Every structure is written in C-alpha cells, then in structure tokens.
Image: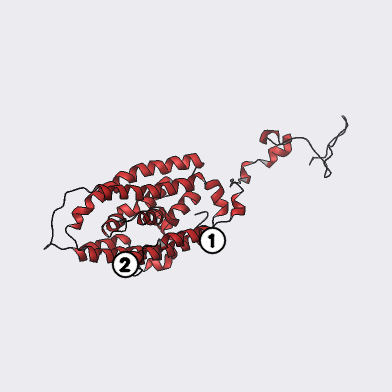
Amino acid sequence: MSISRHPIALDIEQQVGRGGRLLATVMGLPLVDGIFPVLVLAGALSTWMGVLEVGLLVFGGSATVAVVLAELEGGPRQQARAVLIIGAVLMPIALVEAALAPTIAGIVKLGTLERFAGLVILAIAAQTASARIGEYLPRPAVIVGLGLLASLDPAGAKLVTAIEPGVLLRAAATTGVGIGFALAVALASPWLRNAVDIDRFRFGSAVALGVLALSVLGVMPTDAPVALAVLAVTALLSFDPENARTRHTEYRPDAVDLTAAFADGGASQGVAADEQTDEGAAVEYEPDQERAPWL
C-alpha cells in the first residue's frame, strides 16, 4: 500500500485485490466473520456510546482509513459513491443479523459468549498493531465459532422469533456510523493524505480496540466512553493541521514528454513558451539570430 502497510488490509488485499473490493471486504468483515452479531448478543450496542464505539472501531477503524486513503481510486466524489454503494449492501445484512440475534440468544449462554466477544476484539486489536503477532493468533471467525460452541446451551434452548425494534435501530445506527466515517474520510481524502500519519492512527486504534475489549469483558466496569476518548486522542496525535492545508495531488513526471517540450517550446504540454532570464526579463531575439540548440 502506498501510505500504510496495514496488516489486516494487506492480508485481505492479497486475496481480493485493491480498490472497491478491498474496501467492501474490510468493512464487511465484521458481518462475514460473525463479529457483529456476537457484539449485539454481548450487549455492546446497549448504549448509544457503545453504538459509536463499535461503529467507529469495528466498521470504521484504521483499516478503513488506510484503504480509502491509500488504495481507493478516483477523486472524492468517486470514492464517496463507492462508499455509499458498499454501505447500501452492508446495511441490510447488518439488519438481518441483528434480527436473528434474539433467536441465537435463546440457544446460548450469553455470559460465556460475552467473554469470547471480548477475546475476538482483543485478537483484532493485536492483528491491527502487528502482523507478526497476528500470525500466531487464530482468525476472528475461528474465535467466534469456538465461542458459539462453548456457549451452546441445548438444554435451555428456546425459540425466539420476535423482532426487537430497538436492536434493529441500534444495529442500523452502528452500521451508519461506520459508513458515515468512511464517507467523511473519502470526501476529505485530498487533504487527509498529507495530514494523517496512518501508522500512528493504526496503533492508536489498536489501543482503543483493546480498551473496548476490556469493557466488553467487564474488566473495566465503567460507563465512560474510554475507547472513544482513546480514539479521539489518537486522531489528534496522528493529524498534522499544517499539511492539511495542502491538497494532495498525484505527481507523475513520466506524463510530461520533455523532448516534446524542448522541441516546440512546451506548447503541446501546456507550458508557456515565453522565455525569461533569471531576473524575470523577457529574452528578445533578432529575426536573423539563431538560438542555441538548448533554447
């Protein structure tokens, strides 16, 4: 990747390629791996602060930032359109998984599942911080599967078919937060490419994910949005406002034919043909005076 060697994004890039497919996979991974429904069951979305934390750290996060700034092609409008298309696919899937959550809750022990939910977030945090650590950890989908097996309670199983509107609303809001975050990054990408140290943001996001995991595990019994505070501090430390004033432009020197520029005064490349001295005065030639070959 041109800006950040993000471990998770790089691993996915090798399988699906770059651009929109990479962004769709990164943002959809919590739904594919089963992380999102487990967080719903664990009560991570029970408060609106939890909605913000999961939306920004799970659906958004450093991997999304790295892909949008380093891999997504096109200008801000094209990137925003790609994000909205991806969001239109993710939203209904998230709602379906949230609607099935009460049914799953009827056949598992939620206390056990909550512990595995915390473990899977810790695993994602470790993989975000270091690719080497991620090599020794099981994939999130494996941890989710083990959690479902360990928490399965056939004796107390009961079929629940009722749909809880509150759960669906918070699930939609969580997905919307992640999509809105990616959309904001896409629209501001020409300035953020110069201003954001993605590797620093990645490490800070890993710490915020770790704090979120501790909250889910109950190790940090507080209602304060500590993970959001860590993410906010991370954003401040990784942002350089001076560079944000300069719009990022792609410099492609091979696109300019220097031979043509010398041959016709640069007219074919849109270069002004007026010649000036170092002092800025125009150079005048006599009609019968020949120019040197390099002029």
Q: 17 and 50: which one is in front? A: 50
Q: Residue at x 25, y 61 (%)?
A: 145
Q: Position of residue 24 (x, y in %)?
A: 38, 48
Judged from the image, the secondary structure of the residue bearing numbered disc 1 is helix
- In space, the residues marked 2 and 1 are separated at their CA atoms by 28 Å
Specify the label residue 237 is tagged with.
1
Q: Amino acid at mark 2?
A: Leu
Mark 2 neighbour class, 10 Å CA radius: few under 14, some 14 to 19, many 20 or more = some
In-image side of 181 versus 90 (left or right): right
Judged from the image, the secondary structure of the residue bearing numbered disc 2 is helix
Q: Position of residue 17 (x, y in %)?
A: 41, 50
Q: Position of residue 91 (x, y in %)?
A: 33, 45
Which quadrant is home to the C terminus?
top right
Q: Amino acid at mark 1?
A: Leu
Q: Position of residue 69 (x, y in %)?
A: 50, 50
Q: 3 and 291: which one is in front? A: 3
Q: Is residue 81 above or below residue 25?
A: above
Mark 1 neighbour class, 10 Å CA radius: few under 14, some 14 to 19, many 20 or more = some
Q: Which residue is mark 2?
A: 217
Give the tally of numbered discs: 2
Which of the marked residues, 2 or 1, is nearer the chain's N terminus? 2
In-image side of 290 versus 140 (left or right): right
